[in-house]
Image (cartoon, rainbow, N blue to C red):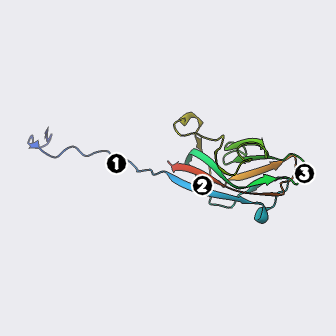
Amino acid sequence: MSLNPITSQEESVPAPLIARKAVAKQTAVFEYDFAKQGGAIETFFLKGPTLPDNAVVSDCWIDVITVPGTGGEGTAAIALGLESTTDIQTSTSYGGAPYSTQGLADLAGPEPGTESGYIKLTATRGLRMTIATARVTAGKFFVIVEYTVTD
């Protein structure tokens, strides 16, 4: 029990807690589908939402539905990024992990529990994909991003 400083009466009500803005983890899903977006050598936005300014990205993974291919036209490299073009997945050969096998795979981006590697957005951003060195002629995958918005 605390003593009221004005009345000097004992009070059974606890002192008020400092109000804190509640933050909840959110998930965004982005899609790459060669049939819809093509596979030219370029940087473009994947189909999906934009993440708000001050979003803190804490985890990312991929669900490969159709393994990307190049139709024998060379070795394509694919990178994924939000704040930069490679902060989720550095430029990696389409024939290697995480793109080379159907199913779920971890991306190089932030890992849960390693806050020093988290990505805090400085503006509203969509997920960019960069295709380099050769065209992609097939492929479909989803990129899942977990984030929390702070001030």
Could you tell me residue 118's position as x and y percent?
Answer: 58, 40
Say which of marks 1 and 2 sits in front: 2
Dot 3 or dot 2: first in sequence order is 2
**What's the residue type where badge 2 is placed?**
Leu
In the picture, the disc for residue 51 is 2
Would you name the residue on which mark 1 appears? 19
Could you tell me residue 139's position as x and y percent?
Answer: 76, 57
- Give the answer, above or below, for where 42 lies relative to 119: below
Mark 1 and mark 3 residues within 8 Å of each other at the beta carbon: no
In the picture, the disc for residue 100 is none
Q: Nearer the viewer, residue 75 or 17?
A: 75
Image-based side of 37 in relation to 3, left or right: right
Could you tell me residue 79's position as x and y percent?
Answer: 75, 46
Dot 1 or dot 2: first in sequence order is 1
**What's the residue type where badge 1 is placed?**
Ala
Mark 2: secondary structure:
loop
Say which of marks 1 and 3 sits in front: 3
Q: Residues within 10 Å of mark 2 (few under 14, many from 20)?
A: many
Mark 3: secondary structure:
loop
- Give the answer, above or below, for where 102 lies relative to 6: below
Q: Residues within 10 Å of mark 1 (few under 14, many from 20)?
A: few
Give the distance between the C-alpha atoms of the residues marked 1 and 2, in whole angstroms: 26 Å
Which image quadrant for residue 140? bottom right
- At 51% from the left and 50% from the top, the residue drawn is 149
